[in-house]
Image (cartoon, rainbow, N blue to C red):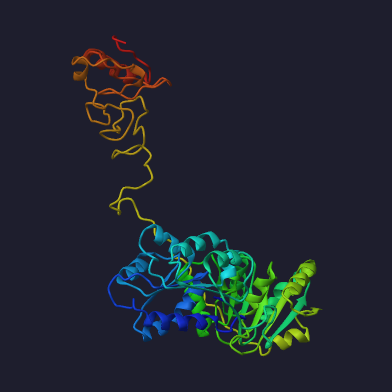
Amino acid sequence: MLGRGKTGSGKTLAFAIPMVVRLAASESAGRRKGRPPRGLILAPTRELATQITDVVDPLAQAYGMTTTTIFGGVKQKRQETALNAGVDIVIACPGRLEDLLQQGLVSLEDIEVTVLDEADHMSDMGFLPGVTRILAKTPADGQRMFFSATLDNDVNKLVRRFLHNEVLHSVDDPSSHVSAMTHHLFEVPVDEKNELIHKLASGTGRRILFTRTKHRAKRFARQLTAQGIPAVDLHGNLSQGARDRNLAAFSDGDVRVLVATDVAARGVHVDSVELVVHVDPPTEHKAYLHRSGRTARAGSSGEVVTVMVPEERKDTLALLRKAAIKVSPKKVTVESAEVAELVGETAAFVAPEPKETPQPKKKTEPGQSGKRSSRRRRGGRGGGNGRGGETSRGGNGSNSRGAENSRGGEATRTGQSGRGHSAASSQEGRPPARAQRSRGNDGTRGNRGGRKVSEARGTSPETRKRNCSRAGSEGSRTVYSTSS
Protein backbone atom coordinates (compact mmCIF):
# COMPACT_ATOMS: atom_id res chain seq x y z
CA MET A 1 0.00 0.00 0.00
CA LEU A 2 1.11 3.55 -0.76
CA GLY A 3 -0.35 6.21 1.51
CA ARG A 4 -0.07 9.94 0.93
CA GLY A 5 -1.46 12.82 2.95
CA LYS A 6 -0.73 16.34 4.04
CA THR A 7 1.51 16.94 7.03
CA GLY A 8 -0.51 16.81 10.21
CA SER A 9 -3.28 14.75 8.64
CA GLY A 10 -2.80 11.70 10.91
CA LYS A 11 -0.71 9.29 8.83
CA THR A 12 0.84 7.75 11.96
CA LEU A 13 -2.53 6.67 13.33
CA ALA A 14 -3.52 5.50 9.85
CA PHE A 15 -0.95 2.68 9.96
CA ALA A 16 -0.60 2.25 13.74
CA ILE A 17 -4.19 1.24 14.48
CA PRO A 18 -4.55 -1.49 11.81
CA MET A 19 -1.04 -2.83 12.52
CA VAL A 20 -1.78 -3.33 16.22
CA VAL A 21 -5.19 -4.90 15.56
CA ARG A 22 -3.81 -7.28 12.94
CA LEU A 23 -0.87 -8.44 15.07
CA ALA A 24 -3.12 -8.91 18.11
CA ALA A 25 -5.40 -11.19 16.11
CA SER A 26 -2.54 -13.11 14.52
CA GLU A 27 -2.01 -16.77 15.38
CA SER A 28 1.63 -16.02 16.17
CA ALA A 29 0.66 -13.74 19.06
CA GLY A 30 2.08 -14.92 22.37
CA ARG A 31 4.03 -13.96 25.44
CA ARG A 32 6.98 -16.31 25.12
CA LYS A 33 10.30 -14.86 26.18
CA GLY A 34 12.71 -13.90 23.44
CA ARG A 35 10.05 -13.90 20.74
CA PRO A 36 11.17 -12.11 17.56
CA PRO A 37 9.35 -8.95 16.43
CA ARG A 38 6.30 -9.27 14.18
CA GLY A 39 5.86 -5.62 13.25
CA LEU A 40 8.51 -3.21 11.91
CA ILE A 41 8.28 0.56 11.42
CA LEU A 42 11.21 2.39 9.80
CA ALA A 43 11.69 6.14 10.27
CA PRO A 44 14.46 8.46 9.02
CA THR A 45 15.16 10.38 12.26
CA ARG A 46 15.35 9.68 15.98
CA GLU A 47 12.75 12.33 16.76
CA LEU A 48 10.24 10.79 14.35
CA ALA A 49 10.92 7.29 15.69
CA THR A 50 10.34 8.53 19.24
CA GLN A 51 7.07 10.22 18.32
CA ILE A 52 5.81 7.15 16.47
CA THR A 53 6.57 5.11 19.59
CA ASP A 54 4.51 7.53 21.68
CA VAL A 55 1.53 6.83 19.39
CA VAL A 56 1.95 3.08 18.94
CA ASP A 57 2.92 2.06 22.48
CA PRO A 58 -0.43 2.86 24.22
CA LEU A 59 -2.30 0.98 21.49
CA ALA A 60 -0.01 -2.03 21.82
CA GLN A 61 -0.28 -2.08 25.60
CA ALA A 62 -4.06 -2.22 25.34
CA TYR A 63 -3.65 -5.55 23.53
CA GLY A 64 -0.93 -6.84 25.83
CA MET A 65 1.88 -6.28 23.32
CA THR A 66 5.22 -4.56 23.73
CA THR A 67 7.22 -2.13 21.60
CA THR A 68 10.79 -0.87 21.55
CA THR A 69 12.66 1.92 19.79
CA ILE A 70 16.00 1.36 18.07
CA PHE A 71 18.22 4.19 16.86
CA GLY A 72 21.83 5.34 17.08
CA GLY A 73 23.38 7.95 19.32
CA VAL A 74 22.70 5.92 22.48
CA LYS A 75 24.15 2.76 23.97
CA GLN A 76 22.66 -0.36 22.46
CA LYS A 77 22.61 -2.36 25.71
CA ARG A 78 19.07 -1.30 26.57
CA GLN A 79 17.94 -2.20 23.07
CA GLU A 80 19.59 -5.62 23.33
CA THR A 81 17.83 -6.24 26.65
CA ALA A 82 14.43 -5.36 25.17
CA LEU A 83 14.99 -7.64 22.17
CA ASN A 84 16.14 -10.53 24.34
CA ALA A 85 13.03 -10.18 26.52
CA GLY A 86 10.79 -10.42 23.46
CA VAL A 87 9.06 -7.61 21.60
CA ASP A 88 6.13 -7.41 19.19
CA ILE A 89 6.70 -4.12 17.34
CA VAL A 90 10.06 -2.46 16.58
CA ILE A 91 10.26 1.23 15.62
CA ALA A 92 13.73 1.81 14.22
CA CYS A 93 16.09 4.00 12.22
CA PRO A 94 17.86 2.04 9.46
CA GLY A 95 21.45 2.57 10.63
CA ARG A 96 21.29 1.06 14.13
CA LEU A 97 18.85 -1.67 13.05
CA GLU A 98 21.27 -2.82 10.38
CA ASP A 99 24.09 -2.88 12.97
CA LEU A 100 22.03 -5.16 15.22
CA LEU A 101 21.17 -7.39 12.27
CA GLN A 102 24.85 -7.81 11.43
CA GLN A 103 25.59 -8.69 15.07
CA GLY A 104 22.84 -11.32 15.03
CA LEU A 105 20.93 -9.64 17.86
CA VAL A 106 17.62 -9.33 16.01
CA SER A 107 15.81 -11.35 13.37
CA LEU A 108 13.23 -10.11 10.85
CA GLU A 109 12.12 -13.56 9.66
CA ASP A 110 8.79 -13.33 11.52
CA ILE A 111 7.83 -9.82 10.40
CA GLU A 112 4.21 -9.73 9.26
CA VAL A 113 3.71 -5.98 8.73
CA THR A 114 6.41 -3.53 7.58
CA VAL A 115 5.83 0.23 7.48
CA LEU A 116 8.16 2.77 5.87
CA ASP A 117 7.30 6.25 7.17
CA GLU A 118 8.54 9.35 5.34
CA ALA A 119 9.69 7.08 2.55
CA ASP A 120 10.79 9.90 0.23
CA HIS A 121 12.88 11.55 2.94
CA MET A 122 14.52 8.21 3.66
CA SER A 123 15.64 8.09 0.04
CA ASP A 124 16.80 11.71 0.02
CA MET A 125 18.98 11.12 3.11
CA GLY A 126 20.82 8.27 1.44
CA PHE A 127 19.16 5.48 3.44
CA LEU A 128 17.90 3.71 0.33
CA PRO A 129 20.66 1.02 0.21
CA GLY A 130 20.22 0.23 3.91
CA VAL A 131 16.42 0.22 3.65
CA THR A 132 16.66 -2.11 0.66
CA ARG A 133 18.81 -4.57 2.61
CA ILE A 134 16.45 -4.44 5.59
CA LEU A 135 13.32 -4.99 3.50
CA ALA A 136 15.01 -7.91 1.76
CA LYS A 137 15.30 -9.67 5.15
CA THR A 138 11.54 -9.51 5.77
CA PRO A 139 9.22 -12.24 4.43
CA ALA A 140 8.07 -11.61 0.86
CA ASP A 141 4.46 -12.54 1.71
CA GLY A 142 4.14 -9.95 4.52
CA GLN A 143 2.24 -6.70 4.23
CA ARG A 144 4.28 -3.61 3.34
CA MET A 145 3.09 -0.02 3.55
CA PHE A 146 4.87 3.15 2.48
CA PHE A 147 3.63 6.47 3.88
CA SER A 148 4.70 10.05 3.19
CA ALA A 149 3.41 13.48 2.29
CA THR A 150 5.16 13.11 -1.06
CA LEU A 151 5.95 9.90 -2.94
CA ASP A 152 8.47 10.33 -5.73
CA ASN A 153 12.11 9.87 -6.79
CA ASP A 154 13.75 6.68 -5.55
CA VAL A 155 10.64 5.53 -3.71
CA ASN A 156 9.51 4.09 -7.05
CA LYS A 157 12.47 1.69 -6.97
CA LEU A 158 11.34 0.34 -3.63
CA VAL A 159 7.78 0.10 -4.88
CA ARG A 160 8.75 -1.92 -7.95
CA ARG A 161 10.89 -4.34 -5.93
CA PHE A 162 8.97 -4.88 -2.71
CA LEU A 163 5.31 -4.05 -3.32
CA HIS A 164 3.04 -6.42 -5.22
CA ASN A 165 -0.44 -5.46 -6.39
CA GLU A 166 -0.03 -2.21 -4.49
CA VAL A 167 -2.84 0.26 -3.91
CA LEU A 168 -2.30 4.03 -3.86
CA HIS A 169 -4.45 5.80 -1.30
CA SER A 170 -4.14 9.59 -1.32
CA VAL A 171 -6.09 11.73 1.11
CA ASP A 172 -5.80 14.75 -1.15
CA ASP A 173 -4.08 16.06 -4.26
CA PRO A 174 -0.25 16.14 -4.09
CA SER A 175 -0.21 19.89 -4.72
CA SER A 176 -2.89 20.72 -2.17
CA HIS A 177 -1.98 22.70 0.94
CA VAL A 178 -3.42 23.26 4.37
CA SER A 179 -6.11 25.89 3.98
CA ALA A 180 -5.58 27.25 7.50
CA MET A 181 -1.88 27.98 6.82
CA THR A 182 -0.97 31.54 5.77
CA HIS A 183 2.36 32.19 4.02
CA HIS A 184 4.41 35.40 4.15
CA LEU A 185 7.58 36.35 2.27
CA PHE A 186 9.67 39.15 3.82
CA GLU A 187 12.69 40.77 2.17
CA VAL A 188 15.16 42.63 4.39
CA PRO A 189 18.73 43.93 4.04
CA VAL A 190 21.45 41.63 5.32
CA ASP A 191 22.38 43.87 8.26
CA GLU A 192 18.75 43.97 9.50
CA LYS A 193 17.93 40.28 9.20
CA ASN A 194 19.01 39.18 12.68
CA GLU A 195 17.07 42.00 14.30
CA LEU A 196 13.94 40.98 12.39
CA ILE A 197 14.35 37.35 13.46
CA HIS A 198 14.63 38.39 17.11
CA LYS A 199 11.49 40.52 16.73
CA LEU A 200 9.51 37.62 15.23
CA ALA A 201 10.60 35.37 18.09
CA SER A 202 9.49 37.77 20.82
CA GLY A 203 5.78 36.86 20.85
CA THR A 204 3.95 34.95 23.56
CA GLY A 205 3.09 31.85 21.52
CA ARG A 206 5.25 28.92 20.44
CA ARG A 207 7.55 29.54 17.48
CA ILE A 208 9.87 27.30 15.48
CA LEU A 209 12.80 28.90 13.66
CA PHE A 210 14.48 26.83 10.93
CA THR A 211 18.10 27.44 9.97
CA ARG A 212 20.28 25.80 7.37
CA THR A 213 23.25 24.93 9.57
CA LYS A 214 23.77 23.49 13.05
CA HIS A 215 26.10 26.29 14.09
CA ARG A 216 23.52 28.92 13.17
CA ALA A 217 20.80 27.16 15.15
CA LYS A 218 23.00 26.98 18.23
CA ARG A 219 24.05 30.63 17.90
CA PHE A 220 20.49 31.95 17.46
CA ALA A 221 19.23 29.99 20.48
CA ARG A 222 22.05 31.38 22.62
CA GLN A 223 21.47 34.96 21.43
CA LEU A 224 17.70 34.81 21.98
CA THR A 225 18.13 33.43 25.49
CA ALA A 226 20.62 36.19 26.31
CA GLN A 227 18.05 38.79 25.13
CA GLY A 228 15.34 37.49 27.45
CA ILE A 229 13.61 35.11 25.00
CA PRO A 230 14.00 31.53 26.30
CA ALA A 231 15.02 29.29 23.40
CA VAL A 232 16.51 25.85 22.81
CA ASP A 233 18.22 24.37 19.77
CA LEU A 234 17.66 21.06 18.00
CA HIS A 235 20.18 19.72 15.50
CA GLY A 236 22.33 16.74 14.65
CA ASN A 237 25.33 17.71 16.77
CA LEU A 238 23.40 17.24 20.00
CA SER A 239 23.41 13.96 21.88
CA GLN A 240 20.15 12.07 22.07
CA GLY A 241 19.69 13.06 25.70
CA ALA A 242 20.12 16.75 24.87
CA ARG A 243 17.68 16.43 21.96
CA ASP A 244 15.05 14.85 24.18
CA ARG A 245 15.50 17.46 26.93
CA ASN A 246 15.27 20.41 24.53
CA LEU A 247 12.24 19.04 22.73
CA ALA A 248 10.53 18.28 26.05
CA ALA A 249 11.25 21.81 27.29
CA PHE A 250 9.61 23.22 24.18
CA SER A 251 6.63 20.85 24.32
CA ASP A 252 6.02 21.48 28.04
CA GLY A 253 6.15 25.26 27.64
CA ASP A 254 9.35 25.86 29.61
CA VAL A 255 10.64 27.68 26.53
CA ARG A 256 8.59 29.10 23.72
CA VAL A 257 11.13 29.19 20.88
CA LEU A 258 12.75 26.21 19.18
CA VAL A 259 15.62 26.90 16.77
CA ALA A 260 16.18 23.83 14.61
CA THR A 261 17.68 22.46 11.44
CA ASP A 262 15.76 20.14 9.11
CA VAL A 263 16.08 17.42 11.79
CA ALA A 264 12.79 18.81 13.16
CA ALA A 265 11.18 19.33 9.75
CA ARG A 266 9.46 15.93 9.72
CA GLY A 267 7.52 14.05 12.32
CA VAL A 268 7.98 16.49 15.21
CA HIS A 269 4.50 17.27 16.48
CA VAL A 270 4.00 19.94 19.11
CA ASP A 271 0.57 21.37 19.77
CA SER A 272 -0.24 25.06 19.29
CA VAL A 273 2.78 26.15 17.24
CA GLU A 274 1.45 29.43 15.87
CA LEU A 275 4.42 30.59 13.80
CA VAL A 276 7.12 28.93 11.69
CA VAL A 277 9.98 31.12 10.47
CA HIS A 278 12.32 30.07 7.67
CA VAL A 279 15.39 31.98 8.83
CA ASP A 280 17.28 30.47 5.90
CA PRO A 281 15.14 29.39 2.93
CA PRO A 282 15.53 25.65 2.31
CA THR A 283 17.22 24.25 -0.77
CA GLU A 284 14.26 22.19 -2.01
CA HIS A 285 10.52 22.69 -2.09
CA LYS A 286 9.72 19.47 -0.20
CA ALA A 287 11.77 20.67 2.76
CA TYR A 288 9.77 23.91 2.68
CA LEU A 289 6.49 22.01 2.86
CA HIS A 290 7.61 19.78 5.71
CA ARG A 291 9.07 22.68 7.69
CA SER A 292 5.88 24.64 7.26
CA GLY A 293 3.86 21.61 8.32
CA ARG A 294 4.98 22.05 11.95
CA THR A 295 2.15 24.58 12.27
CA ALA A 296 -1.54 24.40 11.31
CA ARG A 297 -1.71 20.76 12.37
CA ALA A 298 -4.83 18.75 13.16
CA GLY A 299 -7.20 21.46 11.94
CA SER A 300 -5.61 24.42 13.73
CA SER A 301 -4.38 27.57 11.96
CA GLY A 302 -0.84 28.87 11.66
CA GLU A 303 1.48 31.38 10.03
CA VAL A 304 4.61 30.71 7.98
CA VAL A 305 7.23 33.42 7.34
CA THR A 306 10.15 33.14 4.94
CA VAL A 307 12.89 35.72 5.47
CA MET A 308 15.16 36.41 2.51
CA VAL A 309 17.85 38.92 1.66
CA PRO A 310 18.01 40.55 -1.81
CA GLU A 311 20.65 38.06 -3.00
CA GLU A 312 18.29 35.15 -2.26
CA ARG A 313 15.25 36.59 -4.04
CA LYS A 314 15.58 34.66 -7.30
CA ASP A 315 16.18 31.25 -5.72
CA THR A 316 13.46 31.73 -3.11
CA LEU A 317 10.80 32.65 -5.66
CA ALA A 318 11.73 29.61 -7.75
CA LEU A 319 11.46 27.45 -4.64
CA LEU A 320 7.97 28.71 -3.84
CA ARG A 321 6.81 28.12 -7.43
CA LYS A 322 7.86 24.47 -7.17
CA ALA A 323 6.01 24.19 -3.88
CA ALA A 324 2.92 25.75 -5.54
CA ILE A 325 2.86 28.54 -2.94
CA LYS A 326 1.42 31.82 -4.21
CA VAL A 327 2.76 34.69 -2.15
CA SER A 328 4.09 38.15 -3.01
CA PRO A 329 7.36 39.35 -1.46
CA LYS A 330 7.26 42.39 0.81
CA LYS A 331 10.11 44.64 1.86
CA VAL A 332 9.80 45.14 5.59
CA THR A 333 11.66 46.49 8.59
CA VAL A 334 11.46 45.66 12.26
CA GLU A 335 8.85 48.40 12.73
CA SER A 336 6.59 47.34 9.83
CA ALA A 337 2.91 46.76 10.55
CA GLU A 338 3.01 43.26 8.99
CA VAL A 339 5.73 42.25 11.45
CA ALA A 340 3.91 43.69 14.44
CA GLU A 341 0.73 41.82 13.47
CA LEU A 342 2.56 38.48 13.36
CA VAL A 343 4.36 39.08 16.65
CA GLY A 344 1.23 40.09 18.53
CA GLU A 345 1.70 40.67 22.23
CA THR A 346 5.36 40.78 23.22
CA ALA A 347 6.30 38.32 25.94
CA ALA A 348 7.80 39.50 29.20
CA PHE A 349 11.56 39.59 29.51
CA VAL A 350 13.02 36.48 31.12
CA ALA A 351 16.42 37.04 32.67
CA PRO A 352 18.89 34.36 31.56
CA GLU A 353 20.31 32.13 34.24
CA PRO A 354 23.79 33.28 35.28
CA LYS A 355 26.57 31.06 34.15
CA GLU A 356 28.47 29.29 36.88
CA THR A 357 32.07 30.46 37.00
CA PRO A 358 34.45 27.52 37.27
CA GLN A 359 36.40 27.42 40.50
CA PRO A 360 40.18 27.55 40.02
CA LYS A 361 41.94 24.37 40.92
CA LYS A 362 44.05 24.57 44.07
CA LYS A 363 47.71 23.89 43.58
CA THR A 364 48.94 21.03 45.72
CA GLU A 365 52.27 21.47 47.42
CA PRO A 366 54.71 18.68 46.60
CA GLY A 367 55.28 17.99 50.28
CA GLN A 368 51.57 17.69 51.02
CA SER A 369 50.73 15.33 48.22
CA GLY A 370 51.34 11.61 48.36
CA LYS A 371 51.70 11.45 44.60
CA ARG A 372 54.91 12.10 42.80
CA SER A 373 54.96 15.39 40.92
CA SER A 374 54.63 15.03 37.17
CA ARG A 375 57.11 17.86 36.71
CA ARG A 376 60.66 16.63 36.85
CA ARG A 377 62.55 18.30 39.58
CA ARG A 378 65.62 20.13 38.56
CA GLY A 379 68.53 18.11 39.80
CA GLY A 380 67.23 14.59 39.24
CA ARG A 381 65.62 12.11 41.59
CA GLY A 382 67.63 12.37 44.77
CA GLY A 383 66.98 14.13 48.00
CA GLY A 384 69.39 17.04 47.54
CA ASN A 385 69.01 20.23 45.54
CA GLY A 386 70.58 21.18 42.25
CA ARG A 387 72.49 19.27 39.70
CA GLY A 388 75.83 20.03 41.14
CA GLY A 389 74.95 20.60 44.76
CA GLU A 390 77.52 22.83 46.40
CA THR A 391 80.20 22.13 43.81
CA SER A 392 80.59 22.04 40.07
CA ARG A 393 79.91 18.95 38.03
CA GLY A 394 83.49 17.90 38.28
CA GLY A 395 84.02 18.67 41.96
CA ASN A 396 83.79 16.75 45.20
CA GLY A 397 80.39 18.15 46.11
CA SER A 398 78.35 16.60 48.82
CA ASN A 399 75.12 16.52 46.79
CA SER A 400 75.48 13.57 44.44
CA ARG A 401 72.84 12.12 42.18
CA GLY A 402 72.59 8.76 43.83
CA ALA A 403 73.43 9.50 47.43
CA GLU A 404 72.66 13.22 47.61
CA ASN A 405 71.51 14.13 44.09
CA SER A 406 74.38 15.52 42.01
CA ARG A 407 76.25 14.60 38.89
CA GLY A 408 79.54 15.46 40.52
CA GLY A 409 81.07 14.59 43.83
CA GLU A 410 82.10 11.30 45.28
CA ALA A 411 78.76 9.52 45.24
CA THR A 412 76.71 8.30 42.29
CA ARG A 413 73.17 7.05 41.64
CA THR A 414 73.84 3.69 43.19
CA GLY A 415 75.79 4.91 46.18
CA GLN A 416 79.32 3.60 46.14
CA SER A 417 78.96 1.16 43.30
CA GLY A 418 77.88 3.45 40.43
CA ARG A 419 75.31 2.23 37.93
CA GLY A 420 76.02 -1.37 38.66
CA HIS A 421 79.53 -1.13 37.22
CA SER A 422 81.75 -1.75 40.22
CA ALA A 423 85.42 -2.39 40.23
CA ALA A 424 84.66 -6.04 40.72
CA SER A 425 82.92 -6.18 37.40
CA SER A 426 86.19 -5.51 35.60
CA GLN A 427 87.80 -8.40 37.41
CA GLU A 428 85.10 -10.77 36.19
CA GLY A 429 86.12 -10.31 32.59
CA ARG A 430 83.66 -7.63 31.42
CA PRO A 431 84.99 -5.54 28.55
CA PRO A 432 86.12 -2.03 29.39
CA ALA A 433 83.95 0.86 28.21
CA ARG A 434 84.96 4.18 26.76
CA ALA A 435 86.08 6.36 29.58
CA GLN A 436 84.23 9.41 28.39
CA ARG A 437 80.84 7.60 28.57
CA SER A 438 81.32 5.88 31.93
CA ARG A 439 80.37 6.59 35.49
CA GLY A 440 82.66 5.63 38.33
CA ASN A 441 82.52 4.75 41.95
CA ASP A 442 83.79 8.06 43.21
CA GLY A 443 83.50 10.43 40.27
CA THR A 444 81.21 12.04 37.78
CA ARG A 445 79.89 11.28 34.33
CA GLY A 446 82.29 12.00 31.46
CA ASN A 447 81.32 13.49 28.12
CA ARG A 448 82.69 15.12 25.03
CA GLY A 449 82.62 18.53 26.65
CA GLY A 450 85.59 17.71 28.86
CA ARG A 451 83.89 16.56 32.05
CA LYS A 452 86.11 14.78 34.52
CA VAL A 453 86.02 11.03 34.37
CA SER A 454 86.91 9.64 37.75
CA GLU A 455 86.45 6.03 36.89
CA ALA A 456 86.81 3.85 33.85
CA ARG A 457 86.60 0.14 33.66
CA GLY A 458 89.93 -1.55 34.12
CA THR A 459 91.59 1.13 36.27
CA SER A 460 93.31 0.17 39.42
CA PRO A 461 92.38 1.55 42.86
CA GLU A 462 95.60 3.57 42.89
CA THR A 463 94.70 5.27 39.59
CA ARG A 464 91.21 6.10 40.80
CA LYS A 465 92.61 7.62 43.97
CA ARG A 466 95.11 9.70 42.00
CA ASN A 467 92.33 10.92 39.64
CA CYS A 468 90.16 12.01 42.53
CA SER A 469 92.98 13.98 44.14
CA ARG A 470 93.76 15.74 40.84
CA ALA A 471 90.12 16.71 40.41
CA GLY A 472 90.00 18.27 43.85
CA SER A 473 93.13 20.35 43.33
CA GLU A 474 93.08 21.20 39.64
CA GLY A 475 89.38 21.43 38.85
CA SER A 476 87.73 19.63 35.98
CA ARG A 477 90.14 17.80 33.65
CA THR A 478 89.78 14.68 31.55
CA VAL A 479 91.91 11.83 32.84
CA TYR A 480 92.24 8.58 30.97
CA SER A 481 92.77 5.26 32.64
CA THR A 482 95.85 3.18 31.90
CA SER A 483 93.89 0.46 30.19
CA SER A 484 92.13 2.87 27.81
Residue at (76% x, 77% y) in the render: 186
Q: In which quarter of the image is the C terminus?
A: top left
The one of 69 and 379 positioned closer to us in this rendering:
69
Q: Position of residue 351 (x, y in %)?
A: 56, 81
Quadrant of the image occupied by residue 416: top left
- The residue nearer to you, when weighing 145 against 53, is 145
Looking at this rendering, what residue extends furthest in the front direction? Answer: 165
Residue at point 37% right, 64% down? 106
In this rendering, the answer to whether 50 lies above or below 468 is: below
| Residue 336, quarter of the rendered image | bottom right
Q: Residue at x 38, y 69 (%)?
A: 110
Please tell me whether residue 353 is drawn above or below residue 378 in the rendered image. below
Q: Is residue 238 left or right of residue 402?
A: right
Where's residue 94, x and y in %? 48, 64
- Of residue 147 and residue 306, the one placed in the foreground of this image is 147
Which quadrant of the rendered structure holds the N terminus?
bottom right
In this rendering, the count of numbered labels is: 0
**Side of 158 where 464 appears, left or right:** left
Q: Return the x and y of residue 257 as percentages of the image width and height.
A: 59, 79
Give residue 9's quadrant in the image. bottom right
Residue 261 visible in the picture: no
Residue 132: tell me if it is visible. Answer: yes
What is the residue that sits farthest to the top in this orientation? 482
